[in-house]
Image: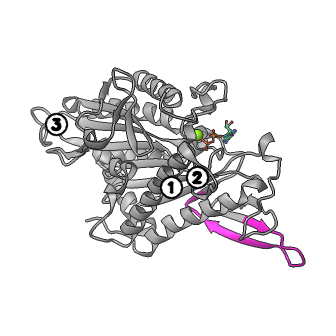
Amino acid sequence: SRYYLEQQRRRALHNSLVELKGNIRVHCRIRPFLSFDNKLDGSASQNCPTPGEVVHAADDETVLVRCALPGRPTTDKTYSFERVYGPAASQAVVFEDLRPLLISLLDGYNVCIMAYGQTGSGKSYTMLGPHSEDDPTLLSGAREDLGIIPRAAEELFRYTLWLISENPSRSPKVDVSIVEIYNNNVFDLLAKDNSTVMSGTKFQMVSTQEGRSEVPRLTCRAVTSAVEFVGLIHRGVKLRVQHPTLVHKNSSRSHLMVTATLTTASSLGSTDPPGQALARLQLVDLAGSECAAVSGVTGSALKETSFINRSLAALADVLGALSEHRDHIPYRNSKLTHLLQDSIGGDAKLLMILCVSPGQKHMAETLRGLTFGARARQAERRAPRRRP
Ligand code: ADP
Ligand code: MG
C-alpha cells in the first residue's frame, strides 16, 4: 500500500541518517535581542575575557562566538550542530525541521524533544509559545507563535487520522500525562486534586508487558482530539507556575514534561499483538541551566539549585554513557532521566534544542551551553549505532 511504501522509504532514510548522525541531534536556536539584554552585568566569561558576540553563520549549521581580546586579533570559536537558527527563525521553521522525527513515531520509535539553556534563553518560548510575566499561562499568542508542544499535539492527531484511514481496525489511542519535576519530586499536573506529589516510595517505575516503563499512579488521560490535548497542556502549564510548594513561583526552577503514548489496539486481521504500544513522545522544557553556575545562594534557592544541578548532571551522564555504549546507563540517578529512559537511548531519537541568548552579559553561560550541546552530539558521531 501507499503507507507501506512510504514507511519503507522513511526507514531507509532513517537508517542512513543514523549511520551519519546517530540518534542524538542538537539544534541550536539563538533568540532575538531583547531590551533586557542591554545591561552588561560585568561578569565576562573566563574563556572570553572581553564580551563576545554570538553569530549565526550563513551555513545554518555553525555558531560563531566572536571574542575580541585586547591587543589581539579577533578570534572566532565555532560550534557545529545539525541545525542553527538565527534570531529571525520562526516557530514554524523550527517545527518543520523536526517533523520527520515525529513521523518516525509511526514506525515505532520513541522520540524525545527537549529544550536546554539558561533562564531567559527562549526554552519555554520554543517549547510552548510566547508568554509574559503577567500571563504565565503561555500559549496565549497568535497561532503562528505556538511552540513545539502544541504543534506536536496537532501533528500527532493528524497521524492518528492517517493511521485510521490506512487501516481502520488499528484504532489508535493517545494517552497523555504531564508532570513537573521540582527538587527531584514528581508532581502529577493532571491529577484530580491538581498536584499529587510522587516522591519517595510513591514514585516507582514498573515495566509493562509491552516493555514500556510506567509510573503506576500517574494520571494518564486518554485524549481523542488535538483540541483536548492542547487543553490539557494549558492546564498543566498553569499549575506548574502556580504551584503552592514552588518557593519562587518561578517556572524556570522546574522541569516540565509532557508524555504522549500512541497505542494501537489491534483487532481481527491485524498482525500486531493486542494493545501493542506504537511509540512514546516526550516533550521537555528543562529548568534553567545557569543554576549550575550560581554561587552564594542560600536556603531554599540553594536547595533548588543543587537539585537542578544534579538532574542536569544526571542527564549529561546518561548521554555520556550512551555515547560510549556502556552496558549500564545510569537512568536512575534522577527522576528526570528515570522518566525519560524509554525515549533516550536504544532506538529512541533525541533532539535537544539548545537555546541561546545573544546578549553579551549571558556569554559565560552561552559558552557552557554550546559546549554541552556540542559534546552530546560529537560523542554520538564518533560511534554511530547501527540498527538491525
Ligand atoms: P526560558 O524559558 O528559557 O527561561 P523564555 O522562553 O521565557 O525563556 O524567553 C524569555 C523571553 O524572551 C520571553 O519574554 C520570550 O517571549 C522571549 N523570547 C524567547 N525567544 C524568543 C523568540 N524566538 N522570539 C521572540 N521572543 C522570544
Ligand atoms: Mg521557561
Q: Going 40% across and 29% down the picture, which residue do you hit?
A: 189
Disc sitting over residue 309 in the figure: 1
In depth, the one of 31 and 255 nearer the eye is: 255
The percent coordinates of residue 365 (x first, y second) are: 66, 58
Q: Is residue 321 magenta?
A: no
Q: Are marks 2 and 1 in contact (CB under 8 Å)?
A: yes
Segment tinted magenta in the rendering: 65-83
Q: Is residue 78 above or below residue 178?
A: below
Q: Which residue is mark 2?
A: 291
Give the distance between the C-alpha atoms of the residues marked 2 and 1, in whole angstroms: 7 Å
Q: Residues within 10 Å of mark 2 (few under 14, many from 20)?
A: many
Disc sitting over residue 275 in the figure: 3
Please state, as top left, top right, bottom left or bottom right, where the N terminus lies in the image: top left
Q: Amino acid at mark 3?
A: Gly
Nearest-to-viewer mark from 3 and 1? 1
Asked whether residue 9 appears in the rendered view, the answer is: yes
Q: 94 left or right of 68?
A: left
Please state, as top left, top right, bottom left or bottom right, where the C terminus lies in the image: bottom left
Q: Is residue 72 magenta?
A: yes
The percent coordinates of residue 72 (x first, y second) are: 86, 79
In depth, the one of 84 and 217 nearer the eye is: 217
